Image (cartoon, rainbow, N blue to C red):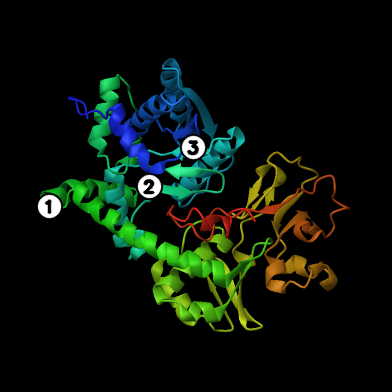
């Protein structure tokens, strides 16, 4: 650190070292909101990349939830552009949900960031989560009754379908990032959504000074997350090995599980493996809460159960895990490019005559002849994406049903879940992540 408390180039290089190797001229994207944390990260990452012959692209997501958000994004762009840092604004377009807006905004933010990186061929996305964020995350997950994986906090390195997500500032306190911005003469914007008592994270943030007075400062709170992270990495390796040997992932978005292999595994490993399957097949990108996961694990072997948006059905001595059709996302227009957190097609596919893409469901199942189902169980077919117009089933692209009749508007779909089965926040499984890949 410098005398004014700012992070030096050498200190930031040390923070980036665990993520090596990078390409000879690394290209990085940085998620920058305009706050002190992300502006400091952009400044440091830009200098780091330039010194290695690379470059940084700063990406600001404009959620459009506040009237002033567009002006703030433009201000970030102007400030960074003046410093020679490339910048792009990514607007969150379309209707916004009335409930659980923070979760929806987070999902939209990462989707837009991922897509921007993929479109530009950038392999590394950096976010400015820091030590105070890690402490708040630990408190949130304690309140939710999380187990080992939740209490290990945010991982420094993880994998999304299009990009590697890096959090180099997790060991760094927020005050140091503020000092870094001040030393560089950067102005920042404080998001009013980060204060007040509307959201749980904001309420917990207000308690941190009281906890610090009792000896539970952010540094003390964040330390257990790092230690549990080492235990999580070991458990992830065991679960990944179990997944590789016991799970068959089908390109149409369902999986078969060998129950004998799961029964022979340590229970914690089996729980972790099941969580990975559910997060992938269910499309949420997140494991179910520990209590529901444990209940589901205890009921494996039943004829059928539902958990985390999935159905688990016993078939011919194996467990079939598929999407619960009734929990699938509502139909979307073809320009959306993504549906249900699991299926993608070329963004911008031409809309035609009110055609929408949604689940086959029970309403469409009767219209799909048995011989066209390719021997797939009905519960699998019901959850497949289909093209609809005014309540009439036009086509089921994954099965090739009705494709010719709708050739002008039938997109080429691919099963591309938000996360691989081997990823729920960790990044230690570089070799095995290709076995159970994110895009089958």
Q: Nearer the viewer, mark 3 or mark 1?
A: 1
Give the numbered dot on residue 63. Answer: 3
Per the image, label 2 sits on a secondary structure element best described as loop
Q: Earlier in the sequence, mark 3 or mark 1?
A: 3
Nearer the camera: disc 2 or disc 1 = 2
Q: Is residue 392 above or below residue 133?
A: below
Q: Is residue 333 left or right of residue 193?
A: right
Residue 431: image location, x then y, percent: 51, 55
Task: Specify whether 83 is left or right of 309.
Answer: left
- Whole-percent x, y for residue 241 in the image: 49, 67
Task: Look at the image and tell me in which quarter the C terminus lies.
Answer: bottom right
Where is residue 349 drawn, in percent x and y?
74, 41
Please tell me whether mark 3 sits on a helix, a strand or a loop.
Answer: loop
The residue tagged 2 is: 156
Which tag, 2 or 1, sits closer to the chain's start? 2
Decide: few, some or many residues near mark 1? Use Cα within 10 Å; few <14, some 14-19, many ≥20.
few
- Mark 2 vs mark 3: which is more N-terminal? 3
Mark 3 and mark 1: Cα distance apart in space:
37 Å
Q: In whole angstroms, how far apart are the C-alphas of marks 2 and 3?
A: 25 Å
Judge from the rendering whether residue 107 lies leftward or rightward of residue 157; answer left or right: right
Q: Residue furthest top?
A: 82
The picture quadrant where one finds residue 324 is bottom right
- Asked whether the viewer can see residue 93, the reply is no
Pick the front one: 297 or 329? 297
Q: What label sits on residue 215 in the rendered view?
A: 1
Q: CA distance from mark 2 to mark 1?
A: 25 Å
Instruction: Identify the residue at the far right of this view.
Output: 405
Say which mark, if any, is on residue 250: none
Element type at mark 1? loop
Please tell me which residue lies in front, 388 or 243. Answer: 243
């Amino acid at each position: 650190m410098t005398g004014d408390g700012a992070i030096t180039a050498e200190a930031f290089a040390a923070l980036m070292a665990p993520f090596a190797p990078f390409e000879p001229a690394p290209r990085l994207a940085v998620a920058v909101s305009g706050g002190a944390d992300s502006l400091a990260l952009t400044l440091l990452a830009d200098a780091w990349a330039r010194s290695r012959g690379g470059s940084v692209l700063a990406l600001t997501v404009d959620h459009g939830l506040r009237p002033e958000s567009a002006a703030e994004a433009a201000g970030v762009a102007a400030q960074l552009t003046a410093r020679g840092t490339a910048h792009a604004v990514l607007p969150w377009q379309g209707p916004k949900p009335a409930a659980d807006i923070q979760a929806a905004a987070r999902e939209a933010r990462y989707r837009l960031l991922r897509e921007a990186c993929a479109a530009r061929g950038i392999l590394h996305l950096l976010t400015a989560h820091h030590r105070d964020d890690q402490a708040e995350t630990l408190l949130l997950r304690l309140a939710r009754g999380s187990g080992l994986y939740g209490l290990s906090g945010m991982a420094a390195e993880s994998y999304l379908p299009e990009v590697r997500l890096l959090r180099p500032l997790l060991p760094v306190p927020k005050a140091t990032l503020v000092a870094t911005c001040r030393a560089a003469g950067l102005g920042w914007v404080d998001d009013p959504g980060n204060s007040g008592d509307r959201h749980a994270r904001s309420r917990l943030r207000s308690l941190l000074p009281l906890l610090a007075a009792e000896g539970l400062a952010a540094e003390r709170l964040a330390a257990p997350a790092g230690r549990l992270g080492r235990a999580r990495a070991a458990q992830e390796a065991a679960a990944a090995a179990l997944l590789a040997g016991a799970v068959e992932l089908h390109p149409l978005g369902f999986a078969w599980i060998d129950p004998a292999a799961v029964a022979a595994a340590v229970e914690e490993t089996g729980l972790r493996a099941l969580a990975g399957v559910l997060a992938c097949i269910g499309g949420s990108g997140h494991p179910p809460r520990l209590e529901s996961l444990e209940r589901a694990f205890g009921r494996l072997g039943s004829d059928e159960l539902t958990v985390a948006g999935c159905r688990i059905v016993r078939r011919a001595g194996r467990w079939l895990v598929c999407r619960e059709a009734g929990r699938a996302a509502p139909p979307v227009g073809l320009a959306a490019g993504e549906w249900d957190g699991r299926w993608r097609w070329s963004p911008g596919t031409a809309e035609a005559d009110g055609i929408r893409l949604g689940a086959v469901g029970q309403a469409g199942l009767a219209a799909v002849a048995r011989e066209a189902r390719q021997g797939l169980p009905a519960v699998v077919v019901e959850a497949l994406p289909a093209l609809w117009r005014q309540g009439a089933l036009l086509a089921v692209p994954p099965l090739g049903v009705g494709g010719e009749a709708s050739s002008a508007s039938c997109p080429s779909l691919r099963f591309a879940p938000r996360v691989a089965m081997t990823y729920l926040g960790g990044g230690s499984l570089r070799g095995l992540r290709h076995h159970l890949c994110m895009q089958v």
